[in-house]
Image (cartoon, coloured by chain):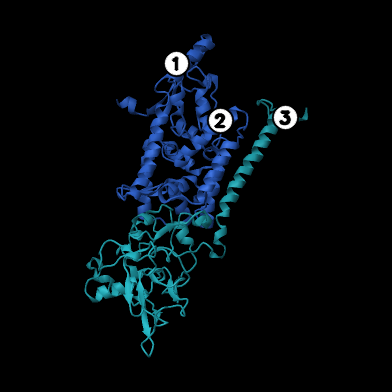
Chain colours: A cyan, B blue
């Protein structure tokens, strides 16, 4: 009877069974909500120790390993992926947690060689996660190249290079102006014959741009980008038989040197926690 | 106005309002009284159902909808694979022949997390809001969302298993969805990350179609398994904030499913096939508020009820157009 007394006047009395049902419904509904929130918060785990930090496309909103703005601003649509002429951009998987669907570059497989000239990924980005504040490749700050294995470097060993830079099966592409101004081709289709290996300098998009500027033919005929600061050079030994690649403050961290380096693993790599502005 | 408020009530998980008998319009009460006196016999009802089941238009709207859903998603895929640049991007944000489009919920998450909005995102968001305002709001769910189609097939499997009594539909309170909506909004705002996007099967499925499959599909499979074995259409019914976002747009939309109470015999088939059966509570005897009642904005305009109704008491209507014509 005490149960009935609780019922407000004017309402139909609720049976004990009915009340038990709605109590259970409330509990399992709360469990569902808590479960979903819990699972969604797991997405933050890869942020610990910046384990989901990666080499990002040009203009990505990041400060060293801190990528909060990039991950927040990115709408995960992949429009940057679609416009890249060398298909350098990939989208992160679930293992990146809240970084899912955010673009990144695997430089050793396919670096950004700026063969689009106009930073197409930046232009395609609908949210400014790749900031529209930059106009030219030289303004990008993706990372910074570092000679990680100087003793493996062919130039440092005084060796030349002959053949396909990454072997016949390598799928990576670069744009070679002397072959086709507009269409990138496979690196495997462009064999080299060098008395002293200088691939990292030779293929550096910034160095190529400097040469174009010097020749008076910058991309799109736009002189505002001229000349970019030097990114990498070979410093020859006294006897002139060997040389060592030296990265300069014009390096944007595009990763072409890491991609083209013929030794395995690459002697030169991109550090994503460094950039020309921070070193 | 009452449509707007009733729609919002249902979107926030409240039970549809039950009108008092005395408050019903006279003509509605007359029809209800007439029907009480002259009920169809069981044989008549069965004949009606059988005639309808054999009709050629039995799956008209479902077929149109599946074709649309597949076409839209294929357009994304083909556009990228063949590089024809017609519809670039994915369902979270895209460009249609160069014009920006942004999914409203994805855009909301980005705005809350990033706290800056660039012009392109505003253009995309407004365009999509206007588009889905015209097309019915949650129409996005059933006519475009790729997860919806997968979930529809999972639902068919669930119903088959349930028929054999191998599984039982565990129901939750619909209040979970608005609560989660609020939580996802607050999480984006507080953490500065688009927390919901990690879970969104819409984004995951769309990207997997366009850019190739990844581990994230395992999460989609887990959701589907939950819906097959535990709770019918659980993600769409109790969790997905995208549905609420588009539902709110739909409260003002002129495109609705309309219930005409005069021809209805209360078989209840419409509620059995519906993703959001509470919106069809007006089809219960005594619930219709007028000779015609518009179904609330939580309705995804999927047309399953229109297809299944043996007496054509449910139909698509564009508000204002019947007067204009």
Q: Nearer the viewer, mark 2 or mark 3?
A: 2
Q: Quadrant of residue A171?
A: bottom left
Whether residue A157 sits left or right of residue B217 in the image: it is left
- Kindly report the distance in space between the C-alpha atoms of the residues bearing marks 3 and 1: 44 Å
- Kindly report the distance in space between the C-alpha atoms of the residues bearing marks 2 and 1: 23 Å
Farthest right residue in view = A1
Q: Residue at x 31, y 62 (%)?
A: A185
Q: Dots 3 and 1: beta carbons under 8 Å?
A: no
Looking at the image, is A149 positioned above or below residue B5? below
Please give the chain letter of the residue carrying mark 1.
B
Residue B168 in sight from this viewpoint: yes
Considering the image in quadrants, where does the N terminus of chain A appear? top right
Considering the image in quadrants, where does the C terminus of chain A appear? bottom left
Q: Nearer the viewer, mark 3 or mark 1?
A: 1
Q: Which residue is mark 3?
A: A16
Q: Which residue is mark 1?
A: B51
Q: Are marks 3 and 1 on the same chain?
A: no
- Kindly report the distance in space between the C-alpha atoms of the residues bearing marks 2 and 3: 30 Å
Q: Residue at x 29, y 72 (%)?
A: A209
Q: Which residue is mark 2?
A: B159
Whether residue A2 sits left or right of residue B62 in the image: it is right
Element at label 2: helix
């Amino acid at each position: 009877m005490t149960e009935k007394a609780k019922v407000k006047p004017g309402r139909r009395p609720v049976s004990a069974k009915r009340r038990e049902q709605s109590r259970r419904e409330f509990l399992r509904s709360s469990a569902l909500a808590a479960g979903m929130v819990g699972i969604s918060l797991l997405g933050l785990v890869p942020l610990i120790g910046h384990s989901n930090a990666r080499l990002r496309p040009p203009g990505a909103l990041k400060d060293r390993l801190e990528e909060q703005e990039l991950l927040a601003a990115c709408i995960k649509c992949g429009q940057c992926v679609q416009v890249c002429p060398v298909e350098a951009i990939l989208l992160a998987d679930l293992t990146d947690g809240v970084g899912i669907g955010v673009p990144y570059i695997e430089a050793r497989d396919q670096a950004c060689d700026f063969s689009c000239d106009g930073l197409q990924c930046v232009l395609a980005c609908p949210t400014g996660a790749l900031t529209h504040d930059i106009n030219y490749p030289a303004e990008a700050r993706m990372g910074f190249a570092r000679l990680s294995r100087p003793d493996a470097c062919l130039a440092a060993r005084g060796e030349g290079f002959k053949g396909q830079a990454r072997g016949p099966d390598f799928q990576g592409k670069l744009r070679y102006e002397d072959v086709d101004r507009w269409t990138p081709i496979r690196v495997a289709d462009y064999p080299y014959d060098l008395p002293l290996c200088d691939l990292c300098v030779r293929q550096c998009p910034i160095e190529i741009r400097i040469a174009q500027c010097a020749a008076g033919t910058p991309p799109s005929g736009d002189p505002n980008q001229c000349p970019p600061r030097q990114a990498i050079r070979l410093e020859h030994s006294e006897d002139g038989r060997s040389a060592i690649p030296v990265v300069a403050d014009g390096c944007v961290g595009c990763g072409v040197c890491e991609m083209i380096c013929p030794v395995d693993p690459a002697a030169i790599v991109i550090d994503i926690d460094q950039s020309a502005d921070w070193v | 106005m009452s449509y707007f408020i009733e729609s919002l009530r249902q979107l926030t998980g409240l039970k549809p309002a039950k009108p008092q008998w005395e408050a019903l319009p006279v003509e509605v009460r007359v029809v209800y009284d007439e029907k009480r006196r002259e009920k169809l016999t069981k044989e008549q009802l069965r004949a009606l159902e059988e005639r309808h089941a054999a009709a050629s238009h039995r799956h008209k709207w479902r077929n149109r909808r599946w074709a649309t859903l597949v076409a839209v998603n294929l357009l994304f895929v083909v556009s990228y694979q063949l590089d024809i640049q017609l519809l670039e991007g994915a369902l979270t944000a895209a460009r249609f022949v160069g014009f920006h489009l942004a999914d409203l919920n994805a855009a909301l998450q980005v705005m809350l997390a990033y706290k800056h909005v660039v012009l392109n995102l505003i253009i995309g968001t407004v365009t999509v809001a206007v588009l889905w305002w015209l097309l019915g709001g949650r129409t996005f769910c059933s006519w475009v969302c790729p997860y919806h189609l997968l979930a529809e097939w999972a639902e068919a499997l669930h119903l088959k298993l349930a028929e054999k009594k191998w599984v039982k539909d565990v129901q939750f309170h619909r209040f979970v969805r608005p609560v989660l909506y609020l939580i996802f909004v607050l999480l984006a705002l507080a953490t500065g990350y688009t927390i919901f996007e990690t879970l969104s099967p819409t984004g995951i499925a769309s990207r997997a179609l366009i850019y190739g499959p990844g581990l994230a599909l395992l999460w989609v499979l887990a959701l589907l398994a939950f819906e097959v074995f535990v709770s019918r259409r659980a993600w769409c019914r109790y969790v997905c904030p995208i549905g609420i976002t588009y539902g709110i747009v739909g409260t003002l939309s002129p495109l609705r499913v309309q219930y005409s109470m005069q021809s209805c015999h209360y078989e209840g088939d419409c509620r059995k096939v519906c993703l959001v059966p509470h919106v069809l509570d007006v089809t219960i005897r005594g619930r219709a508020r007028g000779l015609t009642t518009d179904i609330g904005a939580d309705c995804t305009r999927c047309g399953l009820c229109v297809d299944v109704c043996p007496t054509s008491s449910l139909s698509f209507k564009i508000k204002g157009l019947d007067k204009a014509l």
